[in-house]
Amino acid sequence: MRLVARRVGSLAWLALVLCACTPETEYEMGEPIEMGPFTFVIEQAYERLSAFPNGDPRMEILVDLRLDAAAGAKVKLDEFLNDTAGDRGMIIHPHVEIRDKDGQSFMGWVRRLSGRQLWRAEFPLVDDAGGVESASLYLHRRAGDFRLVIDNPDRRSGQSSRAAVMLGPAS
């Protein structure tokens, strides 16, 4: 009887773990991604060296998106992906991040570049735990070292809960 109880407990734990996993779909750059009312593509990713107000350098990874469709959208793409629509106001709870092969993640935010079609996600390479001082650890990183991961805040039928895009060949 104990053996049966242990197996049932193990199966219940496994079921809980599997339910907690979010289905992730891999996309290629340039492939349409559908999330909520939006369809967009990741056009390119690249690095930009910038500086903090004190002059210390930091690396940023920039990801350009092109909006192809916004069927029935009541919010803008940046509000959707930054989770700033509605009651949230200025508090940002972004649904976009980049991850390196070691699992280190960096949060980003999306902003409009031009018109209604061109958008950019920006990811400063600063470790939350290490603060501004950690930026020097990431000055050598390149866009190809990362995967873009986007959680779908309004999953609809046939859509993935999460999209992942490799940003290029690793350097």
Image (cartoon, rainbow, N blue to C red):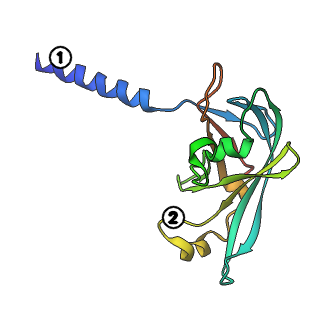
Residue 69 % position (x, y) = 82, 31
Q: Residue at x 62, y 68 (%)?
A: 138
Residue 22 % position (x, y) = 51, 32
Q: Which comes sooner in the sequence, label 2 or label 1?
A: 1
Q: Residue at x 69, y 83 (%)?
A: 55
Tag nearer the camera, 2 or 1 = 2
Q: Residue at x 60, y 72 (%)?
A: 135
Hey, what amino acid is under mark 2?
Answer: Asp
- The residues bearing labels 2 and 1 have C-alpha atoms spaced at a distance of 45 Å
Q: What is the crowding at mark 1: few (fewer than 14 residues within 10 Å), some, or many (at least 20)?
A: few
Q: Examine the rendered structure and indicate whether residue 65 appears above or below residue 128.
A: above
Residue 170 appears in the rendering: no
Marker disc for residue 4: 1
- Helix or strand or loop: what does disc 1 sit on? helix
Q: Is residue 149 left or right of residue 167?
A: left
Residue 80 % position (x, y) = 67, 41
Q: Residue at x 67, y 80 (%)?
A: 53
Figure label count:
2
Hey, what amino acid is under mark 1?
Answer: Val
Q: Dividing the image into 4 quarters, which one contains the C terminus?
A: bottom right
Residue denoted by label 2: 128
Q: Nearer the viewer, residue 133 or 171?
A: 133
Residue 12 % position (x, y) = 29, 23
Considering every residue shown, the one lying at the far bottom of the view is 54
Q: Examine the rendered structure and indicate whether residue 120 appears above or below residue 162.
A: below
Residue 13 appears in the rendering: yes
* Residue 106, picture quadrant: bottom right
Q: What is the crowding at mark 2: few (fewer than 14 residues within 10 Å), some, or many (at least 20)?
A: few
Considering every residue shown, the one lying at the far right of the view is 115
